[in-house]
Amino acid sequence: MSTISAYAAKSKDGKMQPHSIQRREVQANDVLIEILHCGVCHSDLHAIKNDWGNSHYPLVPGHEIIGVVKKVGRDVSKYKEGDTVGVGCLVDSCLSCDACDEHLEQHCLQQPTMTYNSKTQDPGGTTYGGYSKRIVVREEFVLKIPENLDKAGAAPLLCAGITTYSPLHQYGVKKGMTVGIIGLGGLGHMGIKLSAAMGAHTVMITTSEGKAKDAKDLGADEVLISTNQDDMKKWASKFDFLLNTIPVGHDINPYLTLLKYNKTMCLVGAIEPLDSVNGAMLVTGRKAVAGSFIGGLKETQEMLDFCGEHNVVANVESIKMSDINNAFERMEKNDVRYRFVIDMATLD
Amino acid sequence: MSTISAYAAKSKDGKMQPHSIQRREVQANDVLIEILHCGVCHSDLHAIKNDWGNSHYPLVPGHEIIGVVKKVGRDVSKYKEGDTVGVGCLVDSCLSCDACDEHLEQHCLQQPTMTYNSKTQDPGGTTYGGYSKRIVVREEFVLKIPENLDKAGAAPLLCAGITTYSPLHQYGVKKGMTVGIIGLGGLGHMGIKLSAAMGAHTVMITTSEGKAKDAKDLGADEVLISTNQDDMKKWASKFDFLLNTIPVGHDINPYLTLLKYNKTMCLVGAIEPLDSVNGAMLVTGRKAVAGSFIGGLKETQEMLDFCGEHNVVANVESIKMSDINNAFERMEKNDVRYRFVIDMATLD
């Protein structure tokens, strides 16, 4: 069966427009998903603008996908028609290298296949993402969505959720720890919710006093305004872990002063050069600056199950497909609290 | 009993000269050590030159001390007269904070007392180091030296040894791993020996082709010349751990490319600002840049026992006390392979 469906792809005028691309047939291990909701990630905007220089058009973004199973291949055992499922940033990998063996498919040594604008494992193909009515994905890369979760709110868990859950999980965040979440955007708001759900004393660290109330509503126990030098001194050496969601290059040294000895700040947003780092602070404090990149499939399923158990979803603003260009403009002005999610019923 | 002994301290002309300073009496928990050998660490030179702005004169450097026990206080149980012992960078700490409870006395929350140029835990005192005939140290900060080790060669284990052993140990270096040691000086040469003794495939990473033979003699399995771009590409993503001993600020990004996904480079030398770090490499590769600072007493003893078991000591050039100013000059020109050690019998 070949499926033709409507997509929203970037067209010649630089805007997203309905588009049609032939989709692959459902193979033995594939799941055909009717997409209900797709989150709008900042990466989508970078991709359609070719900010990273690797975009191929037509480009269909979207890697925060919630849908319902419509058909499964003959060898599929985990899913059946009618299941609520999700697809995140990954749709394939070699599944046989060291990284895949460690359940870190995002670091597949043969290159993982990302959900859109990516080469398929079979040479010659390109992937198209979730701004679409349907998607076909091999079952290993399909995730179960707990039935109690709001479906639109669950969409951003597939990228923003796992991006923040993974480092919190890697660094053993739990009750008794003091955790700082730096930056309150799509990632930061998930960081607060997840850190609080893990039981940590969670502190929102932001330059913006205007975000203090929101941060507390999201679950932060305290707010630290990082431009207030007295408060920064008060919090020096107090944190067991810092999750830094700032999406641009910046000076990380003031944040490093907040860490206790032998602790780590993990970056998930800044994929740009950082200002000069103070080596003395790392050495004499036995501190670390680490990075983390989404998560593997096993950890993503664990995150979804954790969110089901704690009823954690993103705060979202549901939009129509036709609102996408306006949504991108608002996203560029940080005018979203905290994630746009497209209602795919609105895509004709 | 009060002990007056000769020291080499920095005097008015900026050179090291014999000097006399009153030493404290042996308290109930103290060990009086006759010093046989004291290593010459680059920190000693920084301290006498007040490079870090915190030097108080007269200043007696030296924190790589090997000696023999001459007297013990009434409550000392671990040591007796005649034991071969060592003293490293630390001589006291509060022993009751979280860091001390974790055996990380170097990060004591009340400030550890360093072996020289440091405030004592009792207010008003100052410590004087190992360029001296004798030292009095509380027994918790005295280390057992395995009898099979060459005493002069063992002296640098107390600083250069633990500084490199601790990160190798923290990051679980063992057989089957590929470990890079960056920079071949006092620290780097210990890094090679220890990594090789731990069973790792050990690669010396240096800008200097002239150091290749030495590196192999020290135990390196291979040498990577970091200015050779082809070799750097060949080694991309090959390392399980990197120990960076470069003692000045530098561009760490080329080294980060050498790490496998999810691995760490640990800095032990660069206590200066580092050039801008590529956030994308940290994030998308799930890599980390960490620091490490000497080691706690428990780990230092483990290191000494490990060195005893594997017969690892530093390569040293023994000097007379009267040669110290010349040794400092040579050290500034990197003209030492790989550590000067003062024979304290030569100090009158």
Image (spheres, coloured by chain):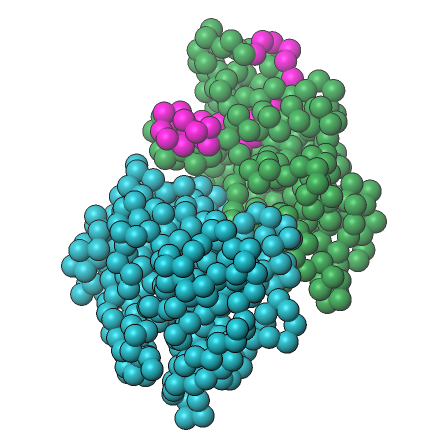
Chain colours: A cyan, B green
- Magenta segment: B79-105
User: Would you say B204 lies left or right of B287 here?
Assistant: right
Residue beneath the point at 52% across and 27% down: B297
Residue B197 appears in the picture as rendered: yes
Q: Give whichever of A204, B133 is nearer the camera.
A: A204
Above-or-below relation of A96 to A39: above
Q: Give whichever of A115, B107 is nearer the camera.
A: A115
Residue beneath the point at 33% across and 51% down: A146
The magenta stretch spans residue B179: no
The picture places residue B165, in percent across and down from the top left corner, at 62, 36
Quarter occupied by residue B323: top right
Q: Give whichever of B332, B315 is nearer the camera.
A: B315
The picture places residue A288, in percent across and down from the top left corner, at 47, 49
User: Would you say A231 lies left or right of A29 here?
Assistant: left
Above-or-below relation of A107 to B269: below
The picture places residue A257, in percent across and down from the top left corner, at 37, 51
Above-or-below relation of A70 to A238: below
Residue B159 appears in the picture as rendered: no
Quarter occupied by residue B221: top right
Residue beneath the point at 61% across and 31% down: B158
The magenta stretch spans residue B80: yes
Residue beneath the point at 29% across and 78% down: A346
Q: Give whichever of A95, B342 is nearer the camera.
A: A95
